Amino acid sequence: MKRRYEHGASTPLPSNSKPRISYHDDENRFSEDENTKDLARKVAEHYSARTNQTLEEREASPIIHLKKLNNWIKSVLIQLYARRGDAVLDMGCGKGGDLIKWDKAQIGYYVGIDMAEGSIEDCRTRYNGEADARRKKFTFPARLLCGDCFEVPLDRVLEDDAPFDICSCQFALHYSWQTEARARRALENVASLLRPGGIFIGTMPDANVLIQKLRNVEGLTFGNSVYSISFNEAHSQKKFDSSKPFGIQYTFHLEDAVDCPECIVPFRIFKSLADEYGLELLLVKNSHEFVDEYLKKLEFVDLMRRLGALGDGKNNHSTISEDEWEVAYLYLVFVFKKRGQPDTQQRSKGNKGRNGLTQISKSDIMFIKTDR
Ligand SMILES: C[S@@+](CC[C@H](N)C(=O)[O-])C[C@H]1O[C@@H](n2cnc3c(N)ncnc32)[C@H](O)[C@@H]1O
C-alpha cells in the first residue's frame, strides 16, 4: 500500500519584518489555478514517461556531452559545498542521477522528492543498487517522497528529517515560476528546512540569455539542431513587465531529454524573493562562466577529463558539439546561504529520529497527496 500524506490548509507563509514584495495581479490570482495544475500535471507526466536508458543508448544520445557537462557542473557544486555527514534534501531529484555525486561527498543522510512517480521509482531502484548490480551500496540512509514540492508545505512532512545542511534543486526550480504562490512555496520550503548557515545550490535557465536570444530572432522561436524554444503570441512584443514576473511561459524541446512548458525566472526578482526568506546569494554564474572559472582548478580538470565532456578538460573542447555548448549557455548556477548562526548541536543530529533506510521498498515511498 502507498504511504500517503494529505496536506490540509496551507501553513501560512512566514511573516517577515521586511515588507513582502507582492506582484499579484488580483484578477488572475485564482483563475490561473487550473492552468497551474495543468502545467504541473504535464511536467510530471513528461518526466514520469521518460524511461531509464541503457548505457549504449545514453552514449548514442545527441546530447551525451551536454549531459556529461551538466554532471560535471553538479559534481563541482556538490564538492564545493557538501561536507562529510551532511543531511541533504534533493528537490526535484528525478531518477536519482546525483546519488553517486552525494555518495562521493560522503554525506550522512539523503531525502529525495519528485512529483514524477516514474522518476521516483527509478530513483528507488538506483538507490537500492537494482539498476546496476556492480555498484556497491550507497553509504548513506535515504528517504524518498513523491509530491509537488512547489505546492505542498514540506515543514510538517519532513519534521523528523529537518534540519538539512544542504538543499539542492537541479534543473527544476523554474517549474515553480508559474505563479507567485508556487515560487514562494518553493523558497519557503527551502528556507524552513535548512539549518541556519545551510546551503541552497541549484541550476536553472538563465532568463537573461533566453530573452536576449528571443530578441535576436525575427519570430518567437529560436534554437539549433538539439533544442528549440518557442514563446507564444502573448510575447510578440518581446517586452517583459517586471511587475508581472511569474507565468512567463515558453515551450522547451531538448533532443532526447525535455519536451515541456517551462517558465522564465528573472534572476533579480528570484534573488529579492529569496532574500525575504532569509536566503542570501553567495554565487550566480552562467554555466559557461562557471565552467571557465572552475576549470582553473586542477581537481576539477581531472574530473572533466574523466567524464570526457570537454575533450582533455583544458583547452581542447573537441568532444562537445557547438550546438550542445550553446545549450549549456542557456543555464545558470546559483548558491544561497540561509542567514543565521549555525547550531552545532543541530548538525550533529546524524540519523537519529530520521526515517532513512538503507534499502527502500515501493511501500516506503511516501506519496504526498494534492487535489490534482
Ligand atoms: C530536468 S529534471 C532534473 C532531475 C534531477 N534534478 C537532475 O538534475 O538529474 C527536472 C525534475 O524536476 C521534477 N519536478 C518538476 N516540478 C516539480 C515539482 N513541482 N515538485 C517536485 N518535482 C518536480 C521533474 O519531475 C523532474 O524529475
Image: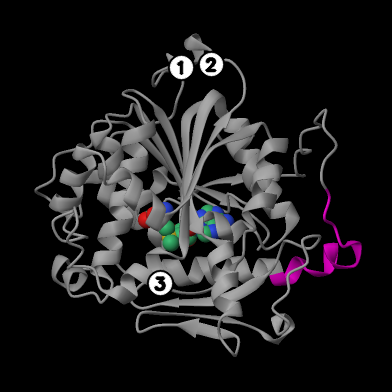
Q: To which quarter of the image does residue 257 belong?
A: bottom left
Residue 360 in view (yes/no): no
Q: Which mark is residue 49?
A: 3
Question: Picture coordinates of residue 236 (x, y %)?
Answer: 70, 85
Whether residue 31 is in magenta: the answer is yes
* Place of residue 297 in the rendered image (x, y in percent of width and height, measured from the top left): 25, 39
Task: Tell which residue pokes out farthest to the top in this image.
Answer: 345
User: Which residue is at the front of the view, 216 or 255?
Assistant: 216
Seen from this angle, which residue lies furthest bottom? 219
Report how far apart the C-alphas of labels 1 and 2 lie in the structure.
8 Å
User: Which comes sooner in the sequence, label 3 or label 1?
Assistant: 3
- Confirm or deny contact between disc 1 and disc 2 (CB under 8 A): yes
Amino acid on which the number 1 mark rests in the picture = Arg
Question: In the image, which is nearer the foreground, mark 1 or mark 2?
Answer: 2
Q: What is the crowding at mark 1: few (fewer than 14 residues within 10 Å), some, or many (at least 20)?
A: some
Marks 2 and 3: which is nearer the front?
2
Highlighted magenta segment, given as a residue range: 22-35
Residue 159, quarter of the rendered image: top right
| Residue 79 in view in this figure | yes
**Of tags 3 and 1, which is closer to the observer?**
1
The residue located at (19%, 53%) in the rendering is: 314
Q: Is residue 121 above or below residue 39?
A: above
Q: Is residue 174 magenta?
A: no
Q: Quadrant of residue 14?
A: top right
Residue 342: assigned label = 2
Pointers 3 and 1 in contact (CB under 8 A)?
A: no
Residue at the image position 20 percent from the left and 38 percent from the top: 299
Q: CA distance from mark 2 to mark 3?
A: 41 Å
Q: CA distance from mark 3 to mark 1?
A: 38 Å
Q: Mark 3 belongs to which amino acid?
A: Ala
Which of the labelled discs sits on residue 347, or is there none?
1
